[in-house]
Image (cartoon, helix red, strand yellow):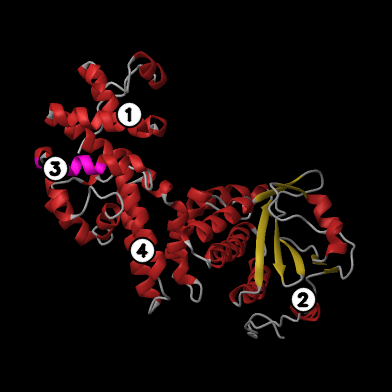
Amino acid sequence: MGTDERVDAEPWHQFVLRVNPYKPSELARRDLRRLASEIWDHPDLEDCVPDLLRHCSAIAKRTLDRRLARAYWNRFKVGVPLFVELGLYCKSRQKQLGSPWSELSRSIPIWDSELGPPGLGDRLLRAEDREAFLAMANLRVQDLSGGFVDAAFGALLQSLAAKQNVPQSRSVGQVEGEDILSLGASLGESTIKANAELLAYVLLKPWIAMDPDDAYRDKVMALLLDRLGDPRTSQNNWDTLAEKLSRIQGLRDAAEVLRVLHQWITEKTVRLFFDLIARTTDRPDQWKERRAFWEAYLDNKFVERAWFALGQDARGLAQIAKSSHGLLFGRVGGSGAASSQSVLLMKIGDLIVAEWSDNGRARFWVDAAENSRFLPKFNSKYYEGQTLRSMSGGTGFEAIAHQGKWYRKFADHIATTTRIPYKGPRPVSLWGW
C-alpha cells in the first residue's frame, strides 16, 4: 500500500513558513505533495483543508489522489474531523484511486471515519478470515499498519469488551484469546501500543471466575508486563488505566478485571521463588515442605500480594526467569547477608509474612496502621539483609522457627490472626499433622 513517500529534510515548521498552505494553487508540485501528505498531523491547519481538497479535485491528478488515500490510511485518528473531510474526498475519487482502494471500498465502508475501522476490524480477528480478506483486497500482511489499522484493532477490542461474557470453558476462552494475540502479533508493535489498555481488558476479562492454563497465562502476563509495566511497582499507572477504561470506554468493571493480572503475578511470584530456591538449596526435602505449605494458601487465593528478594546465589536464575516472564524482584545484600539468603514477602489477610530460604525464623507482622513503622516494604529493589532479618515489634508480631511441627504453629497463628484456615493437603509423607 505504500507510505507517504520519503521524509522531507526540511522541518515542518520551516516548511509552513516558507510556503502558504492557505493557497495550495500557488504551490510547487513538490510542496503540494508534501502538504497533501502531512497536513493531517496538524489540526491547527484545519482551515487550510477545504481549499487544499478543492484544488486537488480541480487538477484531478491520480498520483495526488492516491497520496491522499495513503495519508488517510496511515495517519488516521479516531474522532478527528479532518479525517471526515478527507474520507469524503477519497470516496468522491474512489473510481480513480485504483487498487487496493477500489477493492477495499467494495468490501468495507473505508471512507466513513466512523464505520470504516469497525468494518475492517470485523474481518481481521480470525486468521482464515484475515487471509481471505487480504487476498480479496489485494493487500499484503505488511499493509496492515498505520492509523486506520490501529483504529480497526481498537474498534474490534471495543466490540469484544462490550459483549464479552464468561467463556463456556477454559479452552474456549483460550482459543478466543489466542486469536486476539495472533492478530496483535500480525499487526505489529505500534498497533498493540496504541490499544494496550483495551487489549489488557479483553485478555483478562474471561478469567475473573476461572484460571487459564499456565502456558497461556504466562504468555498474556509477559505481554502485558512488557507493554504496561508491573502493577506492583507502577500502581498509579494501572489505577489511571482502570479509570480511563471506566470513564472513556464505559467499562465499569475495569478495576476488577485488571486485578486478575495482579493475582496472576502474585501466584507466579510465589511459585517462581520456590522454583529458584529449590535449584540452590542444599536441603531439597526441607524446601519441599515449605512449598507445599505456602502453596496451599496460594491455591486457595489467600495470598493477596507477593514480592521476593534474592541473594547472589539465586539472582542469575531470576534474571533468566525475568526475561521470559517479565517479573521484577529485589535483591538482598549488605554486611552479614549470606549469598544464599533470599526472602519471600507475602500478604495473607491482615498478616505480612517474611519466609526465608534458610533455617531462619519466619516473621509475621499484623498489617495495621499503628504498626506501619515496623512493616517491611513490598516491591523494593534492595533490602539490607541483616536489617530485614532483625525487624520486629508492633502489635501481634511473631517470629516462628522452622522446628518441630512448625507447619501447625504457622497455620494456627495465621488462623488466629486472620481467621483464614489451612486448607491444603496433609500427607503423612510430607509431615505428620
Residue 174, picture quadrant: bottom left
Task: Say which label, 2 or 1, has the lower sequence index.
Answer: 1
Label 4, residues with CA under 10 Å away: few <14, some 14-19, many ≥20: some
Q: Residue 92: within the magenta?
A: yes
Q: Is residue 68 left or right of residue 386?
A: left
Task: Say which label, 4 or 1, has the lower sequence index.
Answer: 1
Q: Which mark, by number, is residue 410?
A: 2
Task: Say which label, 3 or 1, has the lower sequence index.
Answer: 1
Amino acid on which the number 4 mark rests in the picture: Ser
Q: Which quadrant: the N terminus? A: top left
Mark 2 to mark 3 CA distance (whole Å) = 74 Å
Q: Position of residue 361 (x, y in %)?
A: 81, 65
Label 3: which residue?
94
Which residue shows up at 59% across the image and 75% down it? 299
Q: Which mark, by number, is residue 48?
A: 1
Tell me which segment is drawn in magenta: 87-95
Q: Secondary structure at mark 2?
A: helix
Q: Is residue 266 left or right of residue 92?
A: right
Q: Which quadrant: the C terminus? A: bottom right
Q: Residue 85: within the magenta?
A: no
Mark 3 to mark 4 CA distance (whole Å) = 28 Å
In the rendered view, tell whether residue 345 sits above or below residue 417.
above
Amino acid on which the number 3 mark rests in the picture: Gln
Label 4: which residue?
159
Which residue shows up at 22% across the image and 20% down it? 25
Q: Position of residue 55 (x, y in %)?
A: 20, 27
